Amino acid sequence: MKKVRERLLVLANRVLLAAALVLVAWCAITTLAGCSNEEASGAVQPESAAFVVGAHANAPLPKSDCASDYIAKAVDTNGYIEVISAEGEPRSAVSGAIVGSTANTESKRAQENEQWKAALPGYLSDVRAQTAEVDTLASIELAARALSEAPGTHSIVVMDSGLQTSGALDFTQGALIDADASEVAVWLADHSELPDLTGIQVDWYYLGDVAAPQEDLSPAQRDNLRSIWQAILETAGAQVAFHDTTPASDAAEGLPEVSVVDLPERAAMPDSLTAGETVQVELTESDVKFQGDSAEFVDAGQARDAVADCAELMAENGNATCLVEGTTASADPTQGDEGEQFIQELSQARAAAVANLLVEAGADPDAIEARGCGDDHPSHVSDRDDAGKLIPSQAAQNRKVIITISAA
């Protein structure tokens, strides 16, 4: 890699020198011709890009072919390119430089630009993490800083799973994978953890793609991961686009360790219950997601699928009873009794909504009790910081519906 850096730096210096000579000549020509500033502004605008490459453990290696278009545009417009390695301590894997030919003939420029386009993807393919864990948000911030003085338009191309395991957005903490996206973005902003991405286009590839020992995300978890990152990036000022692309089939071996993000698991549902036996299922927001401060489902079909096995178990055990408990994040301490009353009523309404799904699926309504617990439940965890603000990863742990089925 040291040789690669040196090679790129030497090449960059040659290009910069050639660019300076061409610029001097161009200015002289336009001055003699009496060109105005308005006429000169018709020159092609450079398109600069920083690549955030997540070549770390627990994720398949990203393929550099998704970078080809961005590289080609940078080369053809004499833009700037930087390569950042997304890892626990993000770093510049290849020192940035202005790329592309500045030859004074079209044929020579085309020839040299093809050489640039052929060589640059290799620098991305060579990236490998050197430090444990992964801090994608800090990597994006480093990329934004690298672009701050670059010419023309600015793009950050993220090639990473997005499953961060350190820093301000640590998905190993609480139930962050289920957290409310807008709450996460606001929390990061309130704690000055957002980078300044004003005017930057962020294009993301391989979001949610993981490798063993990391367990695969469910479709709902992948969707929420995308919502979280979109809320963060847009709040930071960026324009965002996500691209569905197939990564390499394997992860690289021998890389520094990255912690496994524990994903919520549902209890296995038995075929039947014996007398006195009980089974309990926790439905997180990955299973049953409600609209904000509402008992309306975001996806009613997904919610029905989530309770189908519980309804089937009750149908198989005609004497079974079912308790449906709704729990919420902590009440807003600034709202006093009104806040407590609100979350109590909200949790009751959400429990009733899930109970209704069980009845629709064939369960006996007389055997079901819906109970709103608000933030008063044995499973409740502390979810506000010292300033009284919700901690998204902890609040997500408290937003759930618990179904307990008991055989008489």
Image (tube, grey):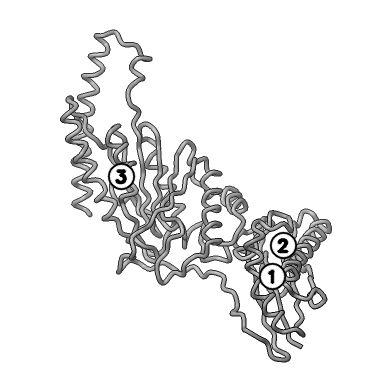
Q: Which residue sits at x=38%, y=39%?
A: 147
Reading the image, the residue beneath label 1 is 380
The mark that comes first in sequence, 2 or 3, is 3
Please give the label number shown on residue 330.
2
| Amino acid of disc 2 | Ser
Reading the image, the residue beneath label 3 is 68
As helix, strand or loop, the secondary structure at mark 1 comes to loop
Please give the label number shown on residue 36.
none
Residue 341 figure quarter: bottom right
Q: Residues within 10 Å of mark 3 (few under 14, many from 20)?
A: some
Tag count in the figure? 3
Q: Residues within 10 Å of mark 2 (few under 14, many from 20)?
A: many
* Residue 134 on image: x %, y %: 42, 60
* Residue 287 on image: x %, y %: 62, 66
Residue 340 vertical position relative to residue 113 in the rendered view, above or below: below
Position of residue 79 in the picture relative to residue 349 (left or right): left
Q: Are marks 2 and 3 in contact (CB under 8 Å)?
A: no
As helix, strand or loop, the secondary structure at mark 2 comes to loop
| Mark 1 vs mark 3: in front | 3
| Amino acid of disc 3 | Ser
The mark that comes first in sequence, 1 or 3, is 3
Residue 341 vertical position relative to residue 148 in the rendered view, above or below: below
Q: CA distance from mark 2 to mark 1?
A: 9 Å
Q: Are marks 2 and 1 in contact (CB under 8 Å)?
A: yes
* Residue 27 on image: x %, y %: 26, 17
Q: CA distance from mark 2 to mark 3?
A: 48 Å
The foreground one among 220 and 215 is 220
| Amino acid of disc 1 | His
Q: Which residue sits at x=52%, y=40%?
A: 237
